[in-house]
DNA sequence: CAAAAATATGACCGATTGGTCATTTATAAA
DNA sequence: TTTATAAATGACCAATCGGTCATATTTTTG
């Protein structure tokens, strides 16, 4: 990797958790300078402005989270195991897989009415998650693991929504109790549809 | 109402939707000045700083939403009717009851790691919603409307989480399709527990 | 109506914002 | 090793930020 690209990645690595924690608007270029110990001029060699850096940070957060998730899910052999791995991966919002919590929730709500580019990135991330879950269920049905009358697409939507909602509740209360109820409920539904 | 209190309320009325749309960090006092057509000095007669105004705006958004919700729910005579009214009230995230969408989601995610005061306000709002739903179900069970084995508290949590998650999904995609799936699923569960 | 108190104004403040650029330093190519 | 290219620096910029305050105006009180 060329020196330039190396520094660019280094900046993104340091910036991503800051943006995910403080939000885009509340994160300043000085915050990134402090975290990277780089000069202001150097930042602008690699990113033409704050918006571009923020977008790169959004992408990075989603990618890192996706890679960690896949690493966990790939340990499972069955469709049911994969769904459980997905649930377990996100079952602890107070100490989440990446600093700041779910980037879809964080950047999504901030970008909603103000940043169409980031909003579309988040929309893509949400769709990806729903499709991932839907295809696992479809695979499980094809496998003979799951009840063939189970609506894969609908449950994928419901499951994703419950996880995000549970994430919000638990982060606000500061403990994972409510998320555990979500986890328990989802696993029960999956069990009920397991043959 | 004294003149001072009148102006204070007027400022909050104008500021609340702006904060709910842009977020606290991204909303400037100039934004409020422009919306109210008041001078900067006048703002600081009624609010000692931006943080105090933002808190008042958060409270206001939650209160207005709560009043509108109660108005809809009070039309129902049965517990099932009240739950359906709650669901219908939030069933259209693209054109939500108040400008900017759900304040619990908006301010919650922003305040999460940065603003403990607002965070606690949102935590209170979330608890209130769960308790509201839980008590309606409990009432329905006492009534003989609902299956007495239904776990009121757990379903209240699940329902609230699904609504918030669905809200996020639909606002990001810009249409209510996924929220309709959430609505359909919740109503089906309620029907299944109706005697 | 007059005096006192509350409210509204806008110029002004220091600090910080995102962003630029001439210059220096380090890397890559010849 | 010399030369050309890329990257890093930090002083600097205009604009905006949240916030103050002397002054003017309006409202309330006696």
Image: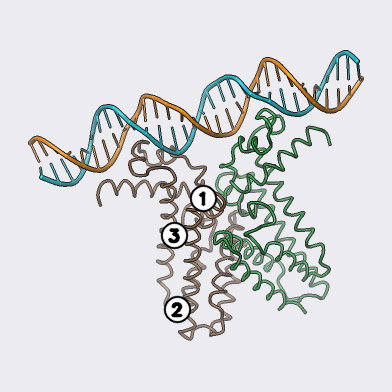
Chain colours: A brown, B green, C cyan, D orange
How far apart in space, not on screen, are marks 2 and 3 (Cα)?
22 Å
Tell me: B35 left or right of A160. right
Q: Are marks 1 and 2 on the same chain?
A: yes
Estimate the x, y position of residue C4 in percent, counting from the top left: 83, 18
**Residue C15 point in image, percent of width and height:** 51, 28
Residue at the image point whose x is 59% and y is 46% from the top? B23
Counting residues from the start of the chain, the first of labels 3 and 1 encountered is 3
How packed is label 2: few (under 14 Cα within 10 Å), some, or many (20 or more)?
some
The one nearer the camera, B5 or B195, is B5
Judge depth for marks 2 and 3 and give the one in front.
3
Crowding at dot 3, Cα within 10 Å, few <14 / some 14-19 / many 20+, comes out as some
**Residue at mark 2:** A78
State the residue at coordinates (66%, 66%): B159
The residue singled out by tag 3 in the image is A65
Q: Nearer the viewer, mark 1 or mark 2?
A: 1
Q: Which residue is mark 1?
A: A115
Residue A190, label in figure: none
């Amino acid at each position: 990797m060329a020196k330039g690209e190396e520094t660019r990645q280094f900046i993104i690595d340091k910036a991503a958790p800051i943006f995910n924690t403080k939000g885009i608007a509340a994160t300043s270029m000085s915050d990134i300078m402090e975290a990277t110990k780089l000069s202001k001029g150097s930042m602008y060699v690699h990113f033409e402005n704050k918006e571009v850096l923020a977008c790169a940070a959004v992408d990075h957060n989603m990618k890192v989270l996706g890679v960690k998730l896949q690493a966990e899910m790939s340990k499972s052999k069955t469709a049911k195991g994969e769904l459980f791995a997905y649930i377990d991966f996100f079952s602890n919002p107070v100490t989440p897989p990446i600093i700041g919590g779910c980037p879809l929730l964080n950047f999504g709500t901030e970008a909603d009415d103000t940043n169409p580019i980031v909003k579309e990135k988040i929309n893509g991330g949400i769709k990806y998650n729903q499709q991932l879950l839907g295809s696992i269920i479809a695979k499980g049905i094809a496998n003979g693991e799951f009840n063939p009358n189970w609506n894969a697409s609908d449950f994928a939507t419901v499951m994703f929504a419950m996880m995000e909602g549970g994430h919000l509740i638990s982060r606000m209360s500061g403990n994972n109790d409510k998320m555990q109820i979500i986890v328990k409920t989802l696993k029960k539904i999956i069990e009920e549809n397991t043959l």
